[in-house]
Amino acid sequence: MVNIGKETETLEFKKTTGEIKEGMVSIASILNKHGIGTLYFGVKPNGDVVGQEVSESSLRDVSRVVYESIKPQIYPAISEEIFDNSHVIKVEFSGENAPYSVYGRYFLRTADEDREVTPEELKAFFGASRHRGKWERDESEATANQIDKNTIKAFWKKAVEVGRLPEGKYTCPMILNRYGLIKNNHLTNAGEILFGNTHPVTLKMAIFATDEKLTFLDMKIHEDNIYNLLKVAEEYILKNIRWRSEINGFEREEIPEIPIAVIREILANSFAHTIYDGRTQHEICIHPSKITIYSPGDYASEHRPEDYVKRNVESELRNPNIAKILYLTKSIEKFGSGFKRINSLCKDAGVKYSYERTGNGFKFIVFRRKLISDILDVAYDVTYGGGEVLTITEQTVLAVLKQDSTISREEIAERISKTVRTVQRALVTLADKGYIKRVGAKKNSTWEVLK
């Protein structure tokens, strides 16, 4: 028996034309992914040629089903082939008008399987595909001189230190040329995003009093290249999450509620897979029960995040040059392993996570441990020192006073969505616990934050 190989992302086998409907699904799926492919009737999935009856009418039947089932219409080449006296039907097809539907549904090819997707997922896939790679290589408006030399030097020192760049003498032009980040005396888009001094990327960061984006306790906006913003984002998160202390022998170890490796992996992948000419900006939101990290441009792969966790699937890089630079400094540990690594680290630390896909971007959500008593409304937060107990309301009021000690009770109440009476109780308690004290006359007093 003749064997003609294995199924691939562009090659599909069906045992007989009795599987013609499934064959149409494969054609549409392959067209949506690659735009060209081949389908054989009379071949087992393992590549063994078993043959089938082939006649003029059977060839016409295949042509008719293709015409009727796949939209927009395609015009494949349908022919008979013979392998060692076994007759098969070969369908060669191509198309440039994707997306293609079959029986009113949409599919994408993943390895040798056809996966149904929603129109929104398909739209996002094509948006990512059009962006992938090409945008990075285009010239930006930044000249070759508009670079952050200190950042480039920090990059190659780190890359050498972690063993992903050979020891040697490097210069800024050498790095830019070596990794294709310069073109016609201008930085490429990837070069500007990575190392430009033109403040090419905007990052918004905020702390909110509740799990809704209503009352913010702090807000910062940074504009810089992504190499620097990765450090800014990491420091902001680590500064504003809870830490606990553990004594190991004679050493005291400070442990964050979310592993640092998880934060770094999420941030690096967020910046690596962004569509940088989109309508939205990077955003980090710290809420009492969760931290969200949003990147513009939706999810960058046709594979679901859980596919990367459960299986070893190939990585799909939206911005290969940016990803390569982040890989060389170990910001990205290994291509395509981000979700698997995050899942493993979170599982070990007992941290839960989720994600949301929207039309404009991708949001990763890390849930914080609930350190409050449902009855007493208390929490421990080392930010407020001493390991003492503060209610959530007291923590929020204290955070507001740290921003503006002249603010009135009424303004605090409006800002944190509480009553004036509740705020007054919190102020009295904070004063009793030694966190604040009143300064000045009663009518024109302000608060001094002591801790």
Image (cartoon, rainbow, N blue to C red):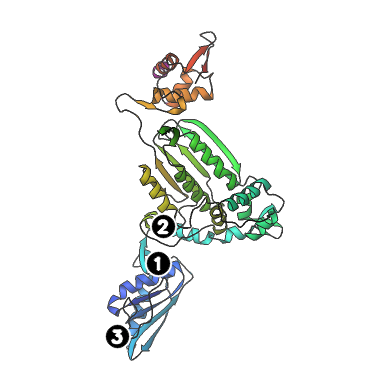
The amino acid type, in three-letter code, at marker 3 is: Gln
Residues at circles 3 and 1 in contact by the CB criterion of under 8 Å? no
Spatial CA distance of label 2 from label 3 is 37 Å
Q: Which residue is mark 1?
A: 109
Residue 430 rendering spot, x and y as whole percentages? 43, 17
Residue at coordinates 41% horizontally, 62% vertically from top-left? 313
Label 3 to label 1: alpha-carbon separation = 26 Å
Q: Which residues are magenta?
A: 417-424
Q: Is 223 left, or right, of 390 in this rendering?
A: right
Residue 335 sits above or below residue 109 on the image: above
Q: Amino acid at mark 1?
A: Arg
Q: As shown in the figure, which amino acid type bears the numbered disc 2? A: Glu
Q: Residue placed at 58% from the left, 50% from the top?
A: 161
Q: CA distance from mark 1 to mark 2?
A: 13 Å
Identify whether 114 is placed above or below 1: above
Q: Nearer the viewer, residue 8 or 329?
A: 329
Between 8 and 388, the residue placed more toward the observer is 388
The spot of residue 226 in percent (x, y) is 58, 47
The residue beneath circle 3 is: 52
Q: Along the line of sight, which residue is nearer the eye, 56 or 427?
A: 427
Q: Which residue is under mark 2?
A: 121
Instruction: Confirm whether the magenta stretch covers residue 418.
Output: yes
Snapshot quadrant of residue 110: bottom left
Circle 1 crowding by C-alpha within 10 Å: few under 14, some 14–19, many from 20: many
1 or 2: mark nearer the eye: 1
Which residue of the protein is positioned furthest toward the top in this rendering? Answer: 441
**Image location (x, y in percent) of residue 427:** 44, 17
